[in-house]
């Protein structure tokens, strides 16, 4: 090519931010025009959002201005929403215009998976963005303030239902159960008035996790007053209540939906062949049939051949994918053809349970309590380090390890 | 009398607390049984409530546990609501029982005056208690969080209507206009999206206040973005809007009612002759025709003979009345008959405008800005000093004068 090729990165999530950072560090802006597009002018750590949702951390600690991390003299930043990708004409339709590209990176994240259960999108909250979790925090506080002011007390104001006892659901319940005593103090309400239900359709909380650790987590959360309803599918969500398949109902003004995610609908809308919004990508992270389009994170599907099931869409994998994608982009820009294959290297998984509690598996080792909690914070800090080095860790990191 | 007489004080507001404190200091519990009855186990400073309502001060700073100020070995405290006074049988009917008395002190405070305007009690907030202002604070934050999450923005979420530009209304508007920039920052909202209306039926804000000071206040508040609608009576409050007499309407999800107060309805319900819930008391603060019942504060009416109008129901006057009432109680208990007459001594009036701003008149002097704001804090601290001495000032006082 005579002109510099144009690389467009859609989405400033884990994958998009890490790709942009890697390209910038490798000085690729000298050889290519690089554009990052994101709906907000900030990046946030999705995996931390259960904390500001419960109000145990301020949301500003989970986000950073993109221009504080990316040098926008080297990488152009466009704040806009993505409507559709036109791969035939190599264009992206944004809310406010169009953008053409030579190479495209799709890291547009996810939306909540409702499994077609009626009423979820109308009546339930989701833990998906700074805006959505700030609303959950405020909503919870508003329920407490309202209860206090009522002459005839409405108990469903103090009943909290978390649908889904997977990773996010359990982490949120952990934070919420830590926050409730503070809220009771703040609003002059007796702790025993407050109910937290964790409702899960599968026969276990944290399906797929080590059984011993799951038991530890459930015992701990029960000791903080959480009531589990396991093997309990939800039939419908209505205003102010959850209807269960078993015929029971739970009255609640606060229903938080955490039953997993599907890929961003833009992917399917743009004609990519996708399952639940996720495209089964090639080994080099490109979309099948598209030599110049990479897809990663929540929008990509990769099968773990050992168990013949997809890898879960985690931050850990998205970050690793961004390394492969940025390496492959470098090669393509330089005209090389031997693209790298993505090989996930799962170092472990840790779920926080609020306060100084967590559970996890690192390699073959099981971790409980304080040490798991410290490990979780180390993982969170490591991401900040990869993104913005020690300054970013000091600014936004979880420094109080124990 | 052979047995010790029983003094019952209803309400732990400014008057009730000060009376109890004065009697305790004079060791009157040795000669009389003294009982204080209050709905909550805490006392709060009503005149500070505009601050926690706007969220510029935590509500705990405006309240104190009654048992932290009153020695409950000397004065019995009963946490209960008052339903009715039966003066014929010298009994008080509480929510949870009955109480007889020899001497009764009524300091039951006020409720909002709605002037019969439809919809006020259903659709408007009021600044009257810790519970009510905590709800206002949470409601405001909830509106911001909701706006942020909306795809189609509903501007009435960010429109705040304060009905009444009297003392409380102006003080609340002052705090709110100080808080809005913080809220805009917290919720990622541009300041110009937020509207604050101060609506007043009378031909001036702060009716009765010095004109020059009123102009200072209005200019200051307008510079912070407050829009005044003076000489603008409200016809009706409906869900989500205020209808004005001039045919206009203002859409708002947050309508705060501050058009003055009337005496507690218990007074009229108990057969006392009252105007807007206030009993025109004798010069010695006793209810006409009742030798053993004192009434003060918001439930009492005293005419300022110089201008032939009632004194406004302020904390300053309630505190001074409590001195007279406690002195007269002492005399009655000791069998003396020359009761003292109440003579108000208005030292001045200061209205805070948020931040370091205020206006006021002390004696003949007009005060503006910083010096008025410092004077307001000195007045607030002085009350704490009278109630609980220097320890209470240090614990709850406004120590940052400038």
Image (spheres, coloured by chain):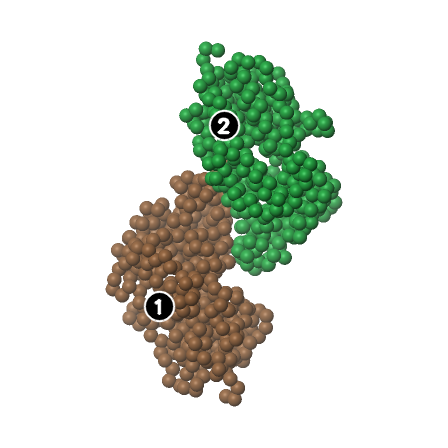
Chain colours: A green, B brown
Under tag 2, what secondary structure? helix
Q: Gap between marks 2 and 1, in whole Å?
A: 69 Å
Which label number is shown at residue A21?
Answer: 2
Q: Which residue is mark 1?
A: B311
Q: Check the image and name the residue furthest to the top.
A: A2
Place of residue B283 in the rendered image (x, y in percent of width and height, measured from the top left): 37, 77
- Is residue B350 toward the left or the right of residue A27 in the image? left
Estimate the x, y position of residue B20 in percent, counting from the top left.
46, 74
User: Please, is residue A309 above or below residue B237 in the view?
Assistant: above
Q: Position of residue B43 (x, y in %)?
A: 47, 65
Of B61 and B361, the residue lying toward us: B61
**Residue A190, percent across and down?**
59, 59
Answer with the quarter of the image where residue B339 lies: bottom left
| Quadrant (top left/top right/bottom left/bottom right) for the C terminus of chain B | bottom left
Q: Nearer the viewer, residue B276 or A286?
A: A286
Asked if badge 2 and badge 1 are on a common chain, one would say: no
Can you tell which of label 2 and label 1 is closer to the viewer?
2
* Residue B55 visible: yes
Q: Chain of mark 1?
A: B
Residue shown at the point (45%, 25%) measured from the top left: A75
């Amino acid at each position: 090519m005579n002109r510099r090729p144009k690389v467009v990165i859609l989405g400033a999530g884990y994958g998009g931010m890490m790709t942009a950072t890697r390209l910038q560090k490798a000085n690729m802006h000298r050889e290519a025009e690089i554009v990052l597009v994101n709906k907000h002018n900030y990046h946030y750590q999705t995996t931390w959002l259960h904390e500001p949702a419960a109000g145990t951390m301020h949301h500003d600690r989970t986000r950073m201005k993109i221009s504080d991390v990316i040098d926008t003299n080297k990488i152009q930043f466009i704040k806009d929403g993505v409507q559709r990708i036109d791969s035939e004409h190599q264009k992206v339709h944004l809310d406010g215009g169009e953008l053409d590209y030579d190479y495209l990176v799709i890291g547009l994240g996810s939306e909540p998976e409702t499994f077609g259960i009626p009423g979820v999108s109308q009546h339930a909250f989701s833990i998906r963005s700074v805006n959505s979790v700030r609303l959950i925090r405020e909503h919870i506080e508003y329920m407490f303030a309202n209860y206090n002011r009522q002459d005839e007390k409405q108990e469903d104001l103090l009943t909290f239902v978390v649908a889904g006892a997977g990773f996010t659901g359990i982490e949120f319940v952990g934070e919420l159960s830590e926050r409730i005593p503070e809220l009771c103090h703040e609003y002059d309400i007796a702790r025993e008035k407050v109910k937290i239900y964790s409702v899960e359709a599968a026969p276990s909380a944290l399906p797929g996790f080590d059984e011993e650790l799951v038991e530890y987590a459930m015992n701990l959360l029960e000791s903080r007053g959480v009531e589990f309803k396991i093997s309990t599918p939800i039939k419908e969500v209505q205003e102010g209540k959850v209807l269960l398949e078993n015929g029971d109902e739970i009255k609640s003004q606060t229903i938080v939906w955490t039953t997993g995610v599907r890929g961003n609908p833009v992917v399917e809308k743009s004609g990519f062949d996708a399952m639940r919004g996720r495209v089964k990508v090639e080994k080099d992270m490109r979309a099948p049939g598209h030599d110049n389009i990479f897809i990663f994170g929540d929008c990509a599907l990769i099968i773990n051949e050992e168990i013949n099931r997809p890898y879960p869409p985690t931050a850990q994998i998205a970050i690793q994918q961004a390394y492969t994608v940025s390496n492959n982009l470098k090669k393509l820009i330089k005209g090389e053809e031997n693209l790298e294959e993505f090989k996930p290297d799962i170092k472990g998984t840790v779920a926080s349970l609020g306060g100084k509690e967590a559970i996890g598996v690192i390699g073959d080792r099981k971790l409980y309590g304080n040490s798991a909690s410290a490990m979780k914070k180390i993982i969170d800090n490591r991401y900040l380090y990869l993104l913005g080095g020690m300054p970013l860790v000091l600014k936004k990191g979880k420094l109080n390890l124990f």
